[in-house]
Amino acid sequence: MTSAAVRRWRRVCCLGTGSLAFAVGSAVVPAAPAIALGPEVSAADQEYYSYYQLGSLHSQGYNGEGAIIAMIDGHVNPNIPELAGATIENKSPCTVRSLPDNADHGTAVAQVLVAPKFGVAPGATLYTYDLGYSEEEVGADCANPGVYARGEADTSLLIEQAINDGADIISISSSYPMYNEDLRWAMARAISQGVIVVAAMGNDSTEDPEDTLPLWSGICGVGAIDTNGALTEYSNWGNGVETVALGTITVRSGTRGEVLTIQGTSFATPIVAGFLAIAWQRFDDDVTANQILQAMTTTGKGSNGEWNYSTGFGAADPWGLLNAKAASLPDVNPCESKAYSSSPSWQDVEDYIDGTVNPLLMRNDDDYVYRGFNEEAAFSPDNDYPVHLGTSPRYHRD
């Protein structure tokens, strides 16, 4: 496994078109309401709101109600006026003292998702999970043996926690190391249980940087386009991208109260997550998460149904998504088949489903039961998981 010294998390954040000089220091996210400087941000301030005709969608009742979105990011300040009335619950398993720029980043993403007046899915429930970026202080309660310095605030364990908490869609706007055993099994679980994971491609203007999360199998990569449908100059592209969306937003800082206009794939990602939450509300229970993703990828604009390196399966279209015949589409995650060998593999997912993964490799998974024959691992004092030795369904198939 990679050592703590070389692990780096960084926001896949933003390029400022306004005042974006966040102060960086050791300040803690304020518990009191942020001071609001200037009028409240509205739908009229968001180019994405009119571009996607979200007002019409919302007026028809499509607002993501009933869907649970998990957001893994900086700490969210729910006390700003733009988030008043939103259903937000901090589900972080341990203490993270987010730096101001990371807290502003998280608060911005939350506004795009569920702000009552301009969020993409204002009726959805938002669970927030405070990510321990490499430069931040995490509490002693984050400690988890063998999980590096971030412990319970690591992306992989937060994905597991979000699944434990019942999330339908997980939105992540940060990078991650190229390979990590914990993320391998977190994503095998997400794929097997039909939990949608979307993540930002990043803003390096390059092809598939090695620390971009969408290189992982099952994670749907989101790039950024402009209002002409062209990939932005800053957006990454490549094997990891499945879709694209607008990347410019106007939001309030959660720490200083200023209104900022910013852009980045970090903000295209919650737009797509919001579309998926609306689709989750729209389709019947017999439509699977995989079929919802198939509906998104088969209705993308500008790709003629073919995948490409720049925009994946094309620009996300909420109207096409909601009008798709999702129940007739394949029950296969289109974000799982990357154009190269990625992790987790098909076999990893099968091993997870069959309960044959060494239980000593599993962390923070409330569902896993070991059903293999490895008695040494099964009865190890370090194994906290239930054991039904030799009962894996793979041993009993015809």
Image: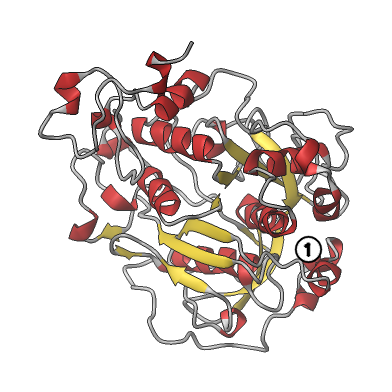
The residue drawn where x is 36% and y is 62% is 92
The residue drawn where x is 67% and y is 55% is 280
Residue 327: give x, y in percent of width and height: 76, 41
- The residue nearer to you, when weighing 244 against 285, is 285
Q: Quadrant of the N terminus?
A: top left
Q: Is residue 240 above or below residue 37?
A: above
Residue 316: give x, y in percent of width and height: 78, 48
Residue 5 position by quadrant: top left
The residue drawn where x is 65% and y is 21% is 339
In the picture, measured across the screen, residue 318 lies left or right of residue 281, that is: right
In the picture, measured across the screen, residue 81 lies left or right of residue 144, that is: right
In the picture, measured across the screen, residue 371 lies left or right of residue 350, that is: left
- The residue nearer to you, when weighing 113 against 136, is 113
Looking at the image, which residue sits at the far top? 398
The residue drawn where x is 50% and y is 22% is 345
Q: What colour scheme has been applied to the protein in the rendered image?
A: secondary structure
Residue 32: give x, y in percent of width and height: 40, 86
Residue 351 in view in this figure: yes
Q: Amino acid at mark 1?
A: Tyr
- The residue nearer to you, when weighing 64 against 98, is 64
Residue 184 position by quadrant: top left
SS state under label 1: helix
Residue 150 in view in this figure: no
Residue linked to disc 1: 48
Residue 24: give x, y in percent of width and height: 40, 66
In the picture, measured across the screen, residue 118 lies left or right of residue 346, that is: right
